Image (spheres, rainbow, N blue to C red):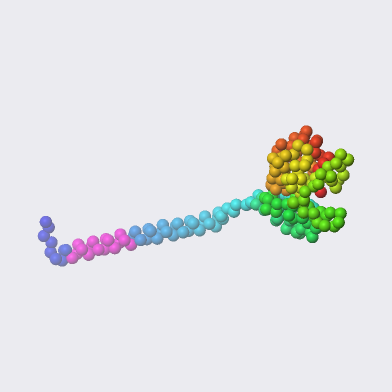
Amino acid sequence: MFNLSNQEKITIILLLIVIIVGVGIILNKNINKEDNFIVNRASDISENNPAIKIEVPPVIIHIAGAVKNPGVYQLKSTDRIVDAVKIAGGATEEANLDSINLAALLRDGQKIIVPYKTYSETGEEINTNTYNHTASVYSSSPVSTSAKININTANANMLQTLPGIGPVLSERIIEYRNQNGFFGVIDDIKDVSGIAEKKYEGIKDLICIQ
């Protein structure tokens, strides 16, 4: 052991204190520099690289029928048929909105036909969702336009009166209509799974879209 005087001991202790304080000051400066660097770097990244916004792709649709401003419009792929009706100025007083699925999502290139209300010969409105055709409509005489089945508004029971259209195909037609909107032309019914050219030939003179 070294024999140190009290003065030497005090001197050594003071030197240790000075060294410890100095090291602490140096470390504190380095930490502050690193913190400032991180903050400044984050600020630079924020300014030079703004947050990337996820854009919803647009769709182009054609809306016609009982709306105030029919035409071609651009909407978002997350929009629904109700949004298409709104952008077209809203439905007219003669629109039958109960016959279409307003909640269906839009798809690019889709044509939406908002149907008009239909009336009987006495002037009463016909509810196409529950209206059932009578057998007299399908007599052996030539089929008139008024006697045809409207594939855009007919319910399952009405669709099943068509030759070759049973419960399965009638539900497919309604499901297709709900997913894609109304048929633009009667030929579009061939897009329904199970309705090929031969079956279409058997029903084309019995159906209409308006």
The reply to whether residue 31 is in sight is yes
Dividing the picture into quadrants, the one containing residue 175 is top right
Is residue 195 or residue 45 the one in the foreground?
195
Rendered residue at 74%/47% (across/down): 155
Query: Which quarter of the rendering shows the N terminus?
Result: bottom left
Magenta portion: prevailing SS class: helix
Residue lying furthest top: 198
Rendered residue at 70%/48% (across/down): 178
The reply to whether residue 67 is in sight is no
Is residue 77 or residue 167 the one in the foreground?
167
Rendered residue at 18%/65% (across/down): 10
* Number of on-image labels: 0
Task: From the top left corner, tell me how far across and down residue 75 is, in percent.
Answer: 70, 53
Residue lying furthest right: 141
Rendered residue at 70%/43% (across/down): 171
Dividing the picture into quadrants, the one containing residue 89 is bottom right
Is 23 one of the magenta-colored residues? yes
Residue lying furthest front: 135
Q: Is residue 8 above or below residue 62?
A: below
Is residue 59 or residue 173 the one in the foreground?
173
Dividing the picture into quadrants, the one containing residue 197 is top right
Left or right side of 132 for 4: left
Is 7 one of the magenta-colored residues? no
Task: From the top left corner, tell me how far across and down residue 78 is, in percent.
Answer: 65, 52
Magenta span of residues: 10-25
Task: From the top left corner, tell me how far across and down residue 196 is, in percent.
Answer: 75, 35
